[in-house]
Amino acid sequence: MHDLTEEKARSAIAAILRYGSLISTLVMALGLILVFLRAPASFGPGGHLGSFRTLFPRVIRLDVAAVAELGILLLLVTPILRIIVAGVAFGLERDYKYVFISLGVLAVVLGSIRLAMF
C-alpha cells in the first residue's frame, strides 16, 4: 500500500510540473503572438499591472499584458501546487515530519511572493 501511494504521489507531482509548465509556456507564447499581431505600443514599459479581479476579463479581451501576466501567474502556481501535493502525499503516508517541512517550504514560497509584490 505504501508503494502504491508513493507512486501515485510521484505521478501527480510529475503531471503538475509537466502540464503546469506547458500550459504557462503556451499562455506566454500566446501573449508573444499577440504582441506581434498588434501594435508594439500596446505592450511595453509604462503599462500598469491590473488587479487579480480584473485579470481574467482582460485575458478574455486578449489584452496582451494580461495574457503575459496570466502566463507568469500560472508559472508561479505550478511549484506551489507541487508543494501542496507533496504535503498531502506525506500526510497520507502519515509522515508528519515531512508534512511540516512541506508546510514550511510553502510558507517561505508564499511569503517570498508576497514580499515581491510590494
Image (cartoon, grey):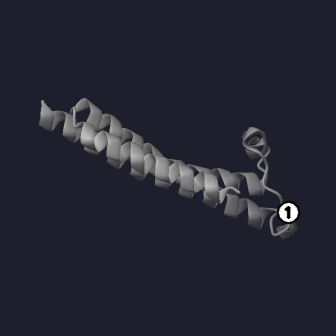
Left or right: residue 104 compared with residue 92: right
Residue 60, percent across and down? Answer: 75, 41
Along the horizontal axis of the image, is 75 left or right of 45? left
Which residue is at a point 28% across and 33% down the rendered structure image?
91
Is label 1 in a helix, a strand or a loop? Answer: helix
Residue 71 seen in the current view:
no
Among the 4 quarters of the image, the one containing residue 48: bottom right
Image location of residue 87, percent across then percent down: 34, 39
Task: State the quadrant of the C terminus.
Answer: bottom right
Residue 103 lies, in percent from the top left, at: 40, 43
Q: For mark 1, what is the residue?
A: 42
Q: At 68% across and 63% down in the image, what residue appears?
A: 32
User: In the displayed structure, does residue 19 sit left or right of residue 14?
Assistant: right
Note whether residue 5 is visible: yes
- Amino acid at circle 1: Ser
Q: Looking at the rendering, which quadrant does residue 8 occupy?
A: top left
Q: Residue at x 45, y 51 (%)?
A: 79
**Residue at 87%, 68% in the rendered image:** 41
User: 19 or 109: which is nearer to us?
Assistant: 109
- Count residues near mark 1 (Cα–Cα under 10 Å), then give few for <14, some for 14-19, many for 20+: few
The quadrant of the picture occupied by the N terminus is top left
Q: Position of residue 4 (x, y in %)?
A: 16, 34
Whether residue 95 is situated above or below residue 26 in the rendered picture: above
